[in-house]
Amino acid sequence: MRAQTCIGILAALLFPASPSSKGETMKGTGLQVWATSGSARVRPVTGRYFVDRTDIHEDYPTGDYRSRNAVWDAAARRVSLHAARNEFVSFQVIVGSDEPVSGVKVRLAALTGPGGARIAGRHVALLKAWYVKVEKPSNGYTKTSLGPGWYPDALLPAPKPGAVSLDIPDPRNRIGPAQRNHTVWVDVYVPRDRAAAPPGQYAGTLGVTSAGASREIGVRLTVWDFALPDEIHCRGDIWNGSLRSMSPEQERHWYQMARRHRFQPGVVYYRPNLKIAGTKVTIDWGAYDRRIAAYLDGSAFTDRQGYWGPGRGLPIGHVLLPFDCSHGGRRSAWPLAEPKEGRTKEFEAVWVQTARQVRAHFDADPKTRRARKIVFLGHLDESYNEAAYEKMIYYCKLLRRGCGERWFDYRIDGGYSFAAMEKLRPYVTLWVCHTAGYDFDKMAHFRKLGVEPWFYGPMIYERRGNSACGSNTFTDLDLLTCRGVGWAAWKLRSGYCQWEFDAFYDDQRKLRRPTKPFEQAWTRAMNCRYGGKEFNGSGLLIYRGELAGLDRPIATIRLKAHRRGLQDYEYFHLLKAAKLGERADALVDSILHTVPFGKRNYTNTAIWRHDPEAWDAARIQAGRLLHEAASR
């Protein structure tokens, strides 16, 4: 009863009933409207960029960007965008008022292009920013944090397509009377089929109205003559421990949001029901298949399941298999923990027999064969001792006896030394290395020996102690730390992994009663405390919509920045496929000054350019190259 009451109160705060216009006071006829790209957040009080901080980085943007920026021309009152097909392109509308104003409507119905082609409906989404308050910098980032303030973060979908309503100040967000500005995020998805979105110029009008004022700005979109791939070529995932506790229907919404944002959840551990009698193993796959078969065969990403966007009908890229060894009671082993008396022939027979049945099940259905199979023994995560290395090798050998040597990839996570990897490389085929230990030459050496590298952890190190962080998503850092994932992956020829997208942890990293912490995520930025450390927005890229009266997950601006970087990666991939790989590398090198990560970059906070417009210009240059190549 208490949990339901709390949810109801929060939902009422976020989505109250629309007030009647009768008798409603609407002031503030002097609305100011301007726009910017999706790469810089705007302060709701001053209307300035959060990254307008040349005291942190000299090349952060400053000046009169409200008159002109990468997408906005105030003199022409126009937003100018560029996109490929099968791509999301975004911008932000900033509505300002020096006096309180309520009932402001922001509308954008459609963009019309060649031959009357229209981008409309769900392909033009207006999302109202929800603000969270950062009280103090994330631990270890006192110099590079953008500081305290109300950050636009969650993006609330409009009740109906094409329009959102807002108040300044917003009484639900409780910023207070100092609020003078409100952000509306606009997502435009360009359909994949050329017939639906032929190349050329598209135009529409975005209107902003209140009781005493109206403003219009033009929106122009150049659609290039190529499409981003449906496949996700930047290998990796974002680890998650919460989706399995959701209903299958709810979980599907999260997978679909992930697909639209070009990443895959890394969920451990989906497990079938298993019975062991002596050395006889019986596996019941019914519940397991009902849970994840739709992701393995791609049917979760079809029109029938309500999906639209990139990657329609494609299966997930990889699946983490159910295996794990003993974990001191914190996580049960699967299929069987080591006996107290030590390893026995019977124990080994169970592991081998289970492995054979796992392979047989996946191989039986051609639709499930396409996903890459990965074994990750969570018990041995970041384990740096000889006993752990022995276990890694032992269990790999057992699983190879059952599944075969080439059928699965054997993954380890951690910043292992060169000497340790020399022992492990005959068995390890996927090394997820913490950015603190990601030395480029070391990783290149083992790549040549058949070990695929991924990285995880912070993108920027203000100090060596930041290596304790598994997340790269802090609210109070600039959005380039999210966008940079795709760019760093291209430069390093590496995959990536991140820790969580749905996290809220207390001092001991133990998830508290689910309702309370996930409610608090809506009202405060500090979401992760452990070991005396505190972080804003760590591992929290998606909010739980059901706590706001919605049955869908809610994306953040930081997730949009992450998507932008992964879409940028697809540009580089297409350039390489068009035999323009050197141009792709040159564009990335023009932004990333140095090879990121590793000891050489401890305390280096300037591994890339900090003006987001430079990143946008590089992406547009890549698009023009691909458009020209397609036109030849």
Image: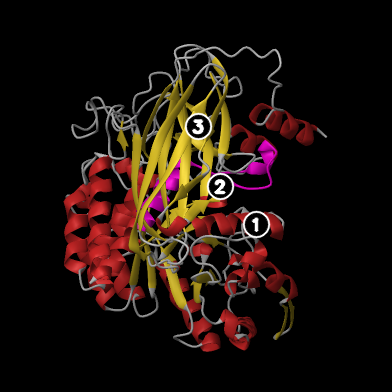
State the residue at coordinates (35%, 80%): 426
Q: What element carries label 2?
A: loop
Q: Which mark is residue 332?
A: none
Q: How crowded is mark 1: few (under 14 residues within 10 Å), some or many (20 or more)?
A: some
The residue under label 3 is: 525
Q: Are marks 3 and 2 in contact (CB under 8 Å)?
A: no
Q: Which residue lies furthest to the right in this view?
A: 1
- The amino acid sitting under disc 3 is Ala
- Residue 231: % across, % down: 44, 69
Q: Which of marks 2 and 1 precedes in the sequence?
A: 1
Q: In which quarter of the image is residue 146?
A: top left
Q: Give the side of residue 53 with respect to residue 100, left or right.
A: left
State the residue at coordinates (39%, 37%): 218
State the residue at coordinates (70%, 60%): 248
Q: Is mark 3 on a helix, strand or loop?
A: loop
Residue 424 belongs to magenta span: no
- The amino acid sitting under disc 1 is Glu
The residue under label 2 is: 502
- Residue 602: % across, % down: 23, 45
Q: Which mark is residue 251?
A: 1
